Image: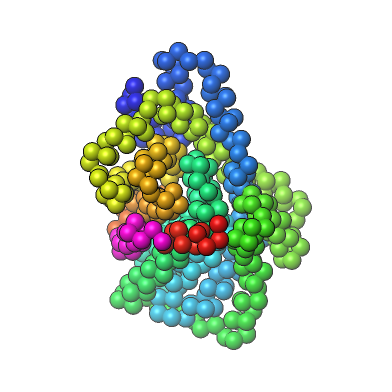
Amino acid sequence: MSIVLFVLLLGLIVINVPIAFAIGFACLSYILVKDINIALVAQRAATGIYSYPFLALPMFVFAGVLMEHGGITQRMMRLANAVIGHISGGLAAVTVAGSALFGALSGSAIGDTAAIGSIMIPAMKAKRYAAGFAAALQGCSGVLASLIPPSLTMVILGATGNISIAGLLIGGLVPGLLMAFLLIMVSLLISRRRGYGKGERATWREFVAAVSDSVLPLLLPVIILGGILGGIVTVTEAAVLAVVYAFFLSAVVYREVKLTDLPEISMQVLRIAVPVQLIVAISHLFAWIVTTEQIPQQLTAFFAAVAPDPLTFLIMLNFLLLLLGTFMESNALIIILIPILMPVVQQYGIDPLHFGVMFVVNLCIGANTPPLGVTLMTAAKIAEVRFAEASRAVLPFLAAMIVVLILTILFPQLSTFLPSLFL
């Protein structure tokens, strides 16, 4: 029955049935075959989203959309360009730095890729950077939003696996910054080898203007992390503060958002947040089925036979995740695998924060790995380049990301040190 359930689920995902409906249909089939009261679907789904910490997700989405409409993206790009835009390959470095800065505001990898890509990819093409290179770099840079707080992916993983969301948000910071640094280094090396030009050096007046224009937006991650680390607010309360602050900046300070824009902004938030909440709701029914069928116990017994120590288990698991990430979307992998893997992780005595951050680093690689590669595909569409060309150009950047994954596996302190100091 377990095999049939997974084959049905994966089959539906492969033929592009939306994730929530694929999981729901597979679960409903199980319930009908087992002759279980169908009311269980509604009960488990309601229980799945009845979570106070999970309220942070729509709030962070709301803050990110407000920032997007409030012209914050352009201000972040001006700052990054003023600091490093003049060096050889400077536009490439600005793309990574801008994605990291905007990721600290939006929390969405796809949003980061689209917002920064729509600005930087045309700029790089105008400076004769190869379109495939521009798309590959932006696709890999966009996923920094999945690691640098406030990460929506971390919120979903924490809610699904019952892991501290605050711990995950803080734990992803160091691997995220490390990934950004390596992506900048690789992009600069390639740019210099290919002779990609440098941008114009900002004048002192332009530099001061860019810094002063970015100070207030850069306070947002300070408010979020400072409030959480200081024990002043919970993650959900920090998300609400982020919405209030983002609205204040966008509507009062910069005056680029009007009250009449709020219905459109709210609908955009709903289009992003509601599908994710539906997925999480249905996933709790899936987790109940997984527990009922004793799949975690079977998986634990399997790994105990083939992986005698935690490191071997993590290496085997990451090879599996890299394979699955080539054709499955990040949220699907979280929803399907986390309920199954968490009991195994506990059995091996692995720190849940270390496991969660490692899992997300792997998802970042999968988001840029053909044939799916959702952020790479998004960047390729913006660059108006064939996906195959972007896929060839992404290889050196994937190598840098795999280095971060290896370091995260071997050195748990990269993801656990900061949470251990403050939580």
**Horizontal arrangement in the rendering, residue 46 relative to residue 109 (left or right):** right
Q: Which of 415/32 is in front?
A: 415
| 287 sits to left or right of 396 | right
Q: Position of residue 203 (x, y in %)?
A: 57, 86
Whole-percent x, y for residue 186 in the image = 35, 70
**Depth order, front residue of 43/418:** 418
Residue drawn at the location 44% of the way across and 72% of the way down: 93
Above or below for 10 versus 391: above
User: Is residue 337 at least partly visible in the picture?
Assistant: no
The quarter of the image holding the N terminus is top left
Q: How is the image coloured?
A: rainbow
Membership of 411 in magenta stretch: yes
Identify the residue at horizontal 54%, vertical 49% (top origin): 165
In the image: residue 246, left or right of residue 81: right
Q: What segment is highlighted magenta in the picture? A: 395-413
**Magenta segment, prevailing SS (helix, strand or loop):** helix
Taking the view exactly as shown, the residue that stands out farthest to the top is 35
Q: Is residue 309 visible?
A: yes
